[in-house]
Amino acid sequence: MRKTDRTLAAELASALPGSTVTLRGHVHRRRELAAVTFLIVRDRSGLAQVVVKDGQALPPEETPVQVTGTATANPQAPGGVEVAGPTITPLAEPAETPAVELWRPSLEASLPVLLDHAVTAWRHPAQRARWELAAASLRGFRRTLDDRGFTEVHSPKIVESVTESGANVFELDYFGRPAYLAQSPQLYKQQLVGIFERVYEVGPVFRAEPHDTVRHLAEYVSLDVELGFVRDHHDVIAVLRDVVAGMVAGIEEYAAGAVDRLGLTLPVVPAELPVVHFRDALAIAGAPADEPDLAPAHERALGEWAREEHGSDLVVVEGYPTAHRAFYSHPDPADPQWSRSFDLIFRGTELVSGAQRLHRYADYVAALESRGYPLEPYAAYVDAFRQGIPPHGGFAIGLERWVSRLVGAANIREVTLFPRDLHRLAP
């Protein structure tokens, strides 16, 4: 590997006083005093202070620069060391003035301004910390599943049939034939269980979501898991518990600085997640007994109940009505009106949906017929169950929604790098 002569801002504190160092980063701020100018350089690791005394012209804020100078002790500098006697070389054309002031402790601009200028807004240390949480969560997610014998897979995103019922799909012309952007990898990950037994996928999913809400996107990152040879959905919930704990551990290990910058309190994942049946969840939330699903207000009520009764930010709701869950959800053999499906509520918001799936061909044919769905669009998927797919189940976590709840964002777009929704197609 080629040796680098670059010193990161976070490494400057350990530089030998009097040694020559080279920084590369963006001009974060210029502070001009009567006799001296302080140039603050920002790189991926933090901020470094450069002392400029000879009146040399300085590039404007956000210009990428290289700074070579002498490491000098100064208790007032970040990390106690600054760079003196610098040679400053711009590495690009002078940057235009950004629409947001990135040197301020927090971004005060409105959400539309932040989204319109995402390319620079995400450079703010506190804003960037949000995606650092996401990246660390992904490392923890993958590590947890790799350690448990799962295989990472990638399924097609252009598919011949819709995954879920309903009209929220993006249709496209596939060489003269109708096709769709995948709503989830569901149909493929079930088939892959017959090959690898345990699989997971990290990838985009697409929903033609007609609602302009603070919790929905037209494209988001889905963390999908499917495992075979389960006894029931509780085996799936046990893996979900370990995955969430692994994601928290990933943040603690790889993004502790981001947690500090944002002042976050991470969830404590209990040894076993508290579980409540759907019919009891309705009663807890004060909802009518014939409600087919939980509304956002019900989820918030359950979140409060979980904290009060179990001291937990997490609660699983199991046993949703079979008629109102996906056709591939396994009914409860003891009472088929309830399914072996579940949601995980995290801090008052649904984060995860999962279930034990049907795994017999005849059951799929019957389920489609009972709901009035034609078999033909699902033929390739359903035929796979003629080939011996074991009992299985799985779940999916929305990455952006996970981060949104971690940081307490009012709108999921605040934690999405380049959100796609009902109105936004750029940047």
Image: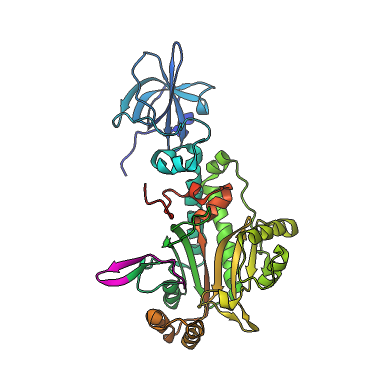
User: Could you say where residue 18 lies in the image, as x and y percent from the top left?
Assistant: 42, 21
The colour scheme used to paint the residues is: rainbow
Vertical position of residue 384 compared to residue 400: above or below = below
- Look at 60% across and 44% down and name the residue there: 264
Residue 13 inside the magenta-drawn segment: no
Q: Residue at x 65, y 83 (%)?
A: 335
Tell whether 374 sits left or right of 354: left
Q: Residue 315, percent across and down?
A: 65, 62
Instruction: Judge left or right: residue 24 versus residue 272.
Output: left
Which residue occupies the foreground of this view, 361 or 251?
361
Q: Which residues are magenta?
A: 164-178
- Residue 141 in picture, x, y percent from top left: 50, 58
> Extreme left residue here?
175
Residue at screen point 47% across, 67% down:
150
Q: Could you say which is closer to the camera, residue 140 or residue 19?
A: 140
The quadrant of the rendering that contains the N terminus is top left
Residue 89 found in image quarter? top left
Q: Nearer the viewer, residue 217 or 363?
A: 217
Spot the residue most to the bottom.
362
> Where in the figure is residue 386, as x and y percent of width and height?
42, 87
Image: 251 above or below 110: below
Instruction: Tell me: residue 178, above or below residue 144.
Output: below
How many numbered badges does the structure rendering display?
A: 0
**Mainly helix, strand or loop, the magenta region?**
loop
Residue lying farthest to the right in this orientation: 309
